[in-house]
Image (tube, grey):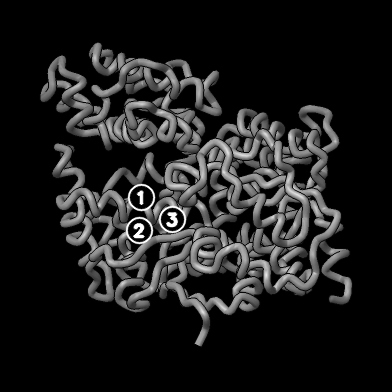
C-alpha cells in the first residue's frame, strides 16, 4: 500500500488536482466548485467535518495532498445526497467524497481507526463473500472488530435491539451458519476479480 | 393476467429473517390486492449499498448492479425493474445512469460481466424504478384509493420520506425539500397526514448508525421528536434503512437523552395492506419492534 502512494506521488509530483482528476471517481468536477459553502450547510453531519466539502475542494487545488487524503472528513458522509441536489454548480459532491475516501483507503492513507472506514470494509467483504448481505455476520464482525472483550461489551449494549429483531423475525439467529447467498457465487467472485483488475490497470495501481 | 407486471429486485434486507422482512410481507399483500405481479430477478445480488464505496470502488460496485440488470433483461424481458428498497433502487439506477453516459465504463462493466455465469451482457434496456414510483405513476392515486375498505380513520401519521427515495433522483414532480407523495398516500388510506412535519427529509444517518451511533442518534432524535411535536402517533416511510434506524434505536435514545419515545415506524405498504382489508399478519405488523397498536386494532376489525 505504501508503494502505491509513493508511485502516485512520483507520477503526479506536485499536481494533486491532476491526480484527483485522473484517479478519483467524478474527480474531474473538483475544479468547478465556486466555494459557496451550500454543501457544508446542507450536510446532516456538517459540524463533524474538520474540512467541509468546499474546503476539501480548495485544498485539492492548493495541493494539500496529505492533509486531504489523511482526513477523517470524507468518512462523515452519510450518503444523504443533500449536497448534490443543492449544489448550484451541480457537482456530484457525494460521489466525489466517496471517491476521495476510496482513493485514500486504496493508498493506505485513510485514518486506520476511523469507524466508518472499518465498517465499510467489513460491509463490502460481507457482500462479496456470498453475494448478499449476511446481517448477523455483519453485526458480529462490527462488534468484535476491536477484539473479544470490546465485542462482548458492545454485544451486551446492543442486546435488547438484537433480541427485539430476532423476536420479530428480522434477524436470523442462525445466520452465521444458515446464510445462503447467491447460487452463482463463483461467477460473482470471478466477475469482481476482473472488475478490480480493470480498475487497477486504468488508475495505474500496481497489482 | 395481472394488471401490471414488473421485474422485481427485492434486495438483501427483504429476505426472510432479515431486517426488512416485514416490508416484504406487506408489499406482497399490497401487490396482491392491487393485482400487480412481481417477477423476482433470479439469483440477484447485493447492490453494494452506498457504504460499499470504500472497499468496492467504482467499477466493482457498478458491475454488481449491472449483473442484476443484465439478468433482468435476459429473463424478465420488456419489464421495468422495480426495487422496494431505497438503496437498491439508488444503486441500480446510479449504475444505469453512469453506464448510459460513459461508453468506456459500459465496455469495462461488460468485460467483467462475461466472467459471471449466465452469459450476461448489460444493454441498458430497462427502466429502474422504485415501488412508490410505480404505484403513483402507473396506477395513480385514484386507483390506489379504490381498494380501501377499512380507512385508517382518526390516525395522524407523519410521512418520513428520508433521503434516498428522494435524492438525488426522487419521484417525478416532487420537490427535494418538501415531497408530498407520502402525505397523499396517508390521505388515501383514510388517515390524516402531518403536513408541517419539518424533519420529513432529514437524514437518519444511514449506515453511519452502525459506525457513528452518537451522531446518527442525534439525527434520529430530531426525526422522532418532530413527529411527536406535530401530534403524530405513527411515522411512515418508504425506506428500509430509515424504518430500521428510526424504530430500533428509540430505546438507546431514551437512555441517552432521557426522552420517552415509543413511536411506531411503519412502511406505506403496511398502511395500504391494512386499509385494503388485510390482516395484521398480512401487513407484517408482527415485525414491528415498537408495536403499531392502533393499526393492529384497525386490522382486527371486520371490514
Question: x, y (%) of residue B257?
Answer: 78, 27
Q: Badge 1: how crowded within 10 Å, few (<14), some, or many (20+)? A: some
Characterize the local packing of mark 3: few (<14), some (14-19) or many (20 or more) Cα atoms within 10 angstroms.
many
Residue B94, numbered circle: 1
Where residue B131 sits in the image (x, y, percent)? 52, 62
Q: Taking A60 as reference, is B174 above or below it?
A: below
Q: Going 20% across and 31% down the picture, which residue do you hit?
A: A4
Quarter assignment of residue A207: top left
Q: Secondary structure at mark 2?
A: helix
Q: CA distance from mark 2 to mark 3?
A: 13 Å
Q: Which residue is mark 2?
A: B65
Camera-side residue: B195 or A144?
Answer: B195
Residue B58 versus residue B277: which sits nearer the camera?
B277
The disc numbered 2 marks a residue on which chain? B
What is the tally of numbered marks visible in this picture? 3
Residue B130's spot in the image, x, y percent? Answer: 49, 59
* Mark 2 surroundings within 10 Å by alpha-carbon count, few (fewer than 14), some (14 through 19), many (20 or more): many
Is residue B273 visible in the rendered image? The answer is yes
Which comes sooner in the sequence, label 2 or label 1? 2
Give SS at disc 3: helix
Same subunit, labels 2 and 1: the answer reads yes
Q: In the image, A74: left or right of A14?
A: right
Q: Do circles 2 and 3 both sit on a common chain?
A: no
Where does label 3 land, which residue? A127
Is the Cβ of the residue at disc 2 closer than 8 Å to that at disc 1?
A: yes
User: What is the distance, in whole Å, between disc 1 and disc 3 at their CAs?
Assistant: 19 Å
Looking at the rendered structure, the secondary structure element under dot 1 is: helix
As drawn, A145 above or below B144: above
Query: Residue A197's spot in the image, x, y percent?
Result: 19, 50
Q: Is residue B294 left or right of residue B31?
A: right
Task: Please say if A79 is above or below B295.
Answer: above
Amino acid at each position: 500500500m505504501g508503494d502505491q502512494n509513493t508511485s502516485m506521488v512520483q507520477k503526479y509530483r506536485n499536481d494533486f488536482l491532476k491526480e484527483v482528476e485522473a484517479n478519483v471517481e467524478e474527480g474531474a468536477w473538483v475544479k468547478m466548485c465556486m466555494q459557496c459553502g451550500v454543501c457544508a450547510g446542507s450536510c446532516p453531519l456538517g459540524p463533524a467535518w474538520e474540512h467541509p466539502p468546499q474546503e476539501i475542494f480548495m485544498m485539492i487545488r492548493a495541493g494539500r495532498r496529505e492533509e486531504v487524503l489523511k482526513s477523517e472528513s470524507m468518512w462523515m458522509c452519510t450518503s444523504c445526497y443533500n449536497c448534490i441536489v443543492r449544489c448550484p454548480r451541480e457537482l456530484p459532491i457525494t460521489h466525489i467524497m466517496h471517491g476521495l475516501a476510496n482513493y485514500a483507503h486504496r493508498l493506505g492513507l485513510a485514518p486506520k481507526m476511523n469507524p466508518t472506514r472499518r465498517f465499510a470494509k467489513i460491509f463490502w467483504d460481507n457482500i462479496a463473500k456470498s453475494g448478499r448481505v449476511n446481517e448477523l455476520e455483519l453485526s458480529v464482525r462490527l462488534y468484535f472488530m476491536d477484539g473479544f472483550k470490546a465485542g462482548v461489551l458492545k454485544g451486551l449494549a446492543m442486546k435488547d435491539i438484537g433480541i427485539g429483531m430476532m423476536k420479530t423475525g428480522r434477524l436470523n439467529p442462525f445466520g452465521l451458519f444458515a446464510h445462503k447467498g447467491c447460487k452463482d457465487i463463483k461467477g460473482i467472485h470471478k466477475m469482481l476479480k476482473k472488475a478490480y483488475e480493470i480498475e487497477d490497470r486504468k488508475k495505474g495501481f500496481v497489482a | 393476467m395481472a394488471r401490471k407486471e414488473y421485474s422485481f429486485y427485492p434486495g438483501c434486507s427483504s429476505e426472510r429473517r432479515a431486517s426488512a422482512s416485514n416490508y416484504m410481507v406487506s408489499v406482497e399483500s399490497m401487490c396482491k390486492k392491487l393485482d400487480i405481479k412481481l417477477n423476482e430477478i433470479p439469483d440477484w445480488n447485493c447492490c453494494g449499498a452506498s457504504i460499499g464505496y470504500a472497499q468496492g470502488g467504482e467499477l466493482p460496485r457498478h458491475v454488481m448492479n449491472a449483473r442484476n440488470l443484465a439478468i433482468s433483461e435476459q429473463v424478465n424481458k420488456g419489464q421495468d425493474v422495480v426495487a422496494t428498497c431505497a438503496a437498491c433502487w439508488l444503486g441500480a439506477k446510479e449504475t444505469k445512469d453512469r453506464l448510459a453516459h460513459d461508453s468506456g465504463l459500459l465496455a469495462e462493466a461488460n468485460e467483467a460481466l462475461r466472467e459471471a455465469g449466465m452469459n450476461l451482457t448489460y444493454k441498458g434496456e430497462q427502466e429502474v424504478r422504485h415501488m412508490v414510483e410505480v404505484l403513483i405513476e402507473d396506477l395513480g392515486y385514484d386507483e390506489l384509493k379504490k381498494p380501501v375498505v377499512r380507512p385508517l380513520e382518526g390516525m395522524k401519521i407523519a410521512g418520513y420520506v428520508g433521503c434516498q427515495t428522494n435524492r438525488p433522483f426522487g419521484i417525478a414532480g416532487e420537490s427535494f425539500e418538501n415531497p408530498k407523495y407520502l402525505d397523499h398516500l396517508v390521505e388515501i388510506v383514510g388517515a390524516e397526514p402531518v403536513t408541517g412535519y419539518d424533519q420529513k427529509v432529514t437524514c437518519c444517518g444511514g449506515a453511519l448508525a452502525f459506525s457513528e451511533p452518537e451522531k446518527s442518534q442525534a439525527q434520529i432524535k430530531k426525526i422522532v421528536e418532530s413527529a411527536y411535536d406535530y401530534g403524530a402517533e405513527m411515522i411512515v416511510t418508504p425506506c428500509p434503512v430509515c424504518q430500521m434506524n428510526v424504530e430500533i434505536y428509540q430505546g438507546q435514545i431514551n437512555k441517552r437523552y432521557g426522552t420517552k419515545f415509543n413511536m411506531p415506524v411503519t412502511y406505506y405498504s403496511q398502511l395500504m395492506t391494512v386499509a385494503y382489508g388485510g390482516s395484521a399478519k398480512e401487513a407484517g405488523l408482527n415485525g414491528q419492534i415498537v408495536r403499531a397498536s392502533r393499526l393492529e386494532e384497525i386490522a382486527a376489525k371486520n371490514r
